Image (cartoon, rainbow, N blue to C red):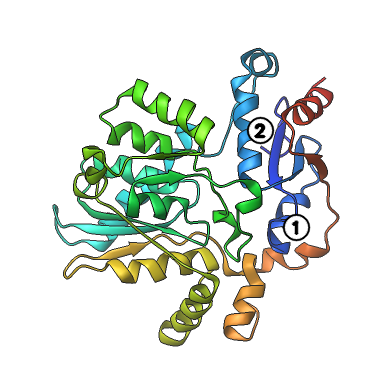
Amino acid sequence: MRGKKGVRVFMTSPHGRMSPFQQAQMFSLQDANIHNLAVQGVFDDCQDIVKAVSNDLDFKRKYRIGTVNSINWARLVAQVVYYFAGYFQATQEDGQQVSFTVPSGNFGNICAGHVARSMGLPVAQLVLATNENDVLDEFFRTGVYRVRSSSDTHETSSPSMDISKASNFERFVFDLLGRDGNRVRQLFGEQLASQGRFDLSRDPAFAAAATTYGFASGKSTHADRVATIRDTHARFGVTIDTHTADGLKVAREHLQPGVPMLVLETALPIKFAATIVEALGHEPERPAKFEGLEQLPRRVTVLPADVAAVQRYITGHCS
């Protein structure tokens, strides 16, 4: 979308909460139609703003606003393809089962796996891996979904999973509760808003998360990431990024005899170089196209975590 006539892109990111490489990759874009908005908060604040802007229907219609992250169903549909592609590469015959482990904070990619499994793909387990922000792991272990505040969201070495309110989780709970829209609205629209949590541990439907839908989960810490990166490099000569390390660590806890386990790799290791250096003692390989990236001039606007402030910015740059 860079340089496209008639298209303006407003990208929100948590101010100071991305790696130096990630910041450089986004903020070095100089195209006049690309606007980087660094929000003074965490990822959940950015996401809440995007939802609020989308829910302001008059504003949305006036400026013809759409979303391009996993809030948009089209993004999930595209990701479903990953699971079929991985399945065909890992199996020798139709009907053979595989499992997938997905590093997850926003429940987007793994929700696509849920869709693929619901379409009939023979998936034994969908294993969700979290970092220290373990809201989703807590739910799949206990049945309690308890969101955290911005101040209680940990800043970790796998920052793309530093999320405490998973946007796409509501889509799965809708299926889990028999597609009862009123019940889902009561949990997410009322109970979660007023109490910050809901508890399905005593609901007979909760057991179906594992028995019917194949979900399992686990948690990985910074120490686990470093150890997994180091072990993977020593055993296979492969360098993995921090989020993939979270997935690999949790995947090993859920292996089943005779069932291939596929771990979804999520990013280039160079994006999280500091942790790679900590684990391996040297910088990860840097693709030639990214040489000197951190030295490029940057174009970014810092804004408070405020819906009105973001709307004012959009209004001022859409005239």
Asked where in the image residue 32 lies, by quadrant, the reply is top right
- Most foreground residue, 153 or 312: 153
From the image, tell me which residue sits under label 1.
24
Asked where in the image residue 187 lies, by quadrant, the reply is top left
Which circle's residue, 2 or 1, is located before the other in the chain?
Answer: 1
Tell me the residue at 50%/46% (across/down). Answer: 106
Tell me the residue at 21%/61% (across/down). Answer: 91
User: Image check: 257 left or right of 163?
Assistant: left
**Image quadrant for the N terminus?**
top right
Asked where in the image residue 236 lies, by quadrant, the reply is bottom left
Query: What's the residue type where badge 2 is placed?
Result: Ile
Picture coordinates of residue 58, whole percent (x, y): 66, 12
Q: Is residue 248 visible?
A: yes
Tell me the residue at 34%/31% (across/down). Answer: 174
Q: How many marks?
A: 2
Query: What's the residue type where badge 1 is placed?
Result: Ala
Is label 2 in a helix, a strand or a loop?
helix
Instruction: Give how far apart the Cα atoms at labels 2 and 1 are.
Output: 23 Å
Q: Residues within 10 Å of mark 2 (few under 14, many from 20)?
A: many
Is label 1 in a helix, a strand or a loop?
helix
User: Image check: 80 left or right of 284?
Assistant: left
From the image, tell me which residue sits under label 2.
49
